[in-house]
Image (tube, rainbow, N blue to C red):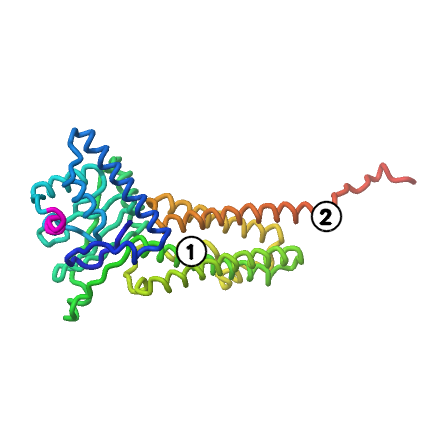
Amino acid sequence: MLYFRVAVVPPKPIDIQNSLSQGSKVAANRNLAEQKKIFAAYLKKKKLKITRQRQVILDSFLKTEGHLSTEELYHQVRQKDRTIGYTTVSRTMKALTDSGLAREIDLGDSRSRFEPLYKRPHHHHIICVECQQTIEFLSPELEQLQEQVVSHYRFRPVRHHFQVFGICEDCQEHRPPRHEDFDSDLVFARDALRIALQTERNGVNFYQTLAKSAKDPKGKDAFLEMAAEEEKHLQELESEWEAMVKKHKRILKAPVFLHFDYKELNRLFPSPEELQERRIDRLTLEEALHLALSMEQGAHRFFKRYAEKFNDTRGKAIFQKFAEEELEHCELIQKECDRLLSSSPPPPQHQEPESSSEKTV
C-alpha cells in the first residue's frame, strides 16, 4: 500500500475500507503481512524480541500515509498504548530502516522523517522551504542518467536520493497552501495508464495510415485487422481509465508522479505525417510488414524495459501487460508476414540467352 504525499501535515490513519477497492484491499493486507514477516525475521536475526509495543509501532507506521517524523509517530502510538516511550519508537524506526521497510529522509524542517519503502518505486522529492509542501516524483530518464554516471566511474551504488528545495507556486503567489494527499500507487497507475493510452492511439493511427497507403489488397486487409485489434485494446484502456476517474474523482488533481519522455514514446509509432514523409506509398508489402514488425518489437522492448525498473505496483502491472500485448502483436505480424509472403507467386527465373553456337541453322 503506497501513498503519495503532497504536503507535510499531521498524519492520519488510512481509511482502508473506503479508499481502496476490494482487490486493492487484498493486496494491501497481503503486503502488510509480508512486511510483518520481514520485520519479525530481522528482529530474530538480531536476537531482539517481537514485543507488543513494537507491533503497535509497526502497525501504526505501515497504516499511516505520508512522511512521518518520530515525534508524530510517538504521539500517534501513545493514543493506543500509553506505556510506549519515545526511545522505543526511535529504536523501532531505526530497526525498520535497517530491515529495508522504511527510509529516513530530510525534508528541510529539521526533523528526520520516514516513509514506507516496501514495494515502492524509487522516487525523489521537491520540497517547499516555506510551507513544507512535498511532491514525490519518478523519472526513468533521471535514473538512467545516474546509472550511466555511476557505471562510468565503476562505482557499486548502495543508496541515493535526489531532492530539490525551493518555493512552491502557492507561496510565490501568496496563496494558502493546498494540503492534499493521494494514494501514490493509484497516481502511478494513472500515469502509466496515460502512457499506455497514448501508445495505443499512436498504434491505431499507424495501422490505419498503412492500410490507406497499401496497394496490395491482402496487405490492406491485414493492416485493417491490426488497426481493429489496436482499437479494441484502446477501448479496454479507455474503459479502465473511465472507471478509475469515476471511482477516484480527485485523482486527476494529483501532481504527475511518473515523468516520462513522451518524445521517445511517440517515436515508437510514426505519426501519419511522418509516414507520408517516408513515402510509405512506395513500400512493397514485405517492406510495410517489416516496418510494422519493427515498431511492435520496439514497443515491446520499451515497456518491458521500464516494467523491470519498478517494484510490484499497479503501474508496473500496466507496463507488464502492455509489453505482453506488444509481444503478441509481434507474433501475429510475423505469422501474417509469413502467410502473405508464402502465398505470393515466386519471382520469374532469369534465363540466359542461347549462345550463337547452340542456334539451329
Instruction: Give the amino acid at mark 1.
Output: Ala
Question: On screen, 127 above or below 146?
Answer: below
CA neighbours of label 2 inside 10 A, class few (<14), some (14 to 19), many (20+): few
Quick one: 35 or 252, which is closer to the camera? 35
In this figure, which residue is indicated by the disc labeled 2? Answer: 345
Question: In the displayed structure, does residue 182 sit left or right of residue 240?
Answer: left
Residue topped by disc 1: 196
The magenta segment is 74-81
Q: In this view, does 89 lie to the left or right of 285?
A: left
> How far across and how far down the image is residue 199, in percent?
45, 57
Task: Please indicate, yes or no, whether residue 327 appears anywhere in the rendered image.
Answer: yes
Decide whether residue 75 is among the magenta residues.
yes
Q: Give the secondary structure at mark 2.
A: loop
Q: Does the magenta stretch include residue 51?
A: no
The alpha-carbon separation of the residues under discs 1 and 2 comes to 40 Å
Cβ atoms at labels 1 and 2 below 8 Å apart: no
The percent position of residue 208, horizontal first and vertical second, equals 55, 61
User: Which of the two discs, 1 and 2, labels the residue nearer the N terminus?
Assistant: 1
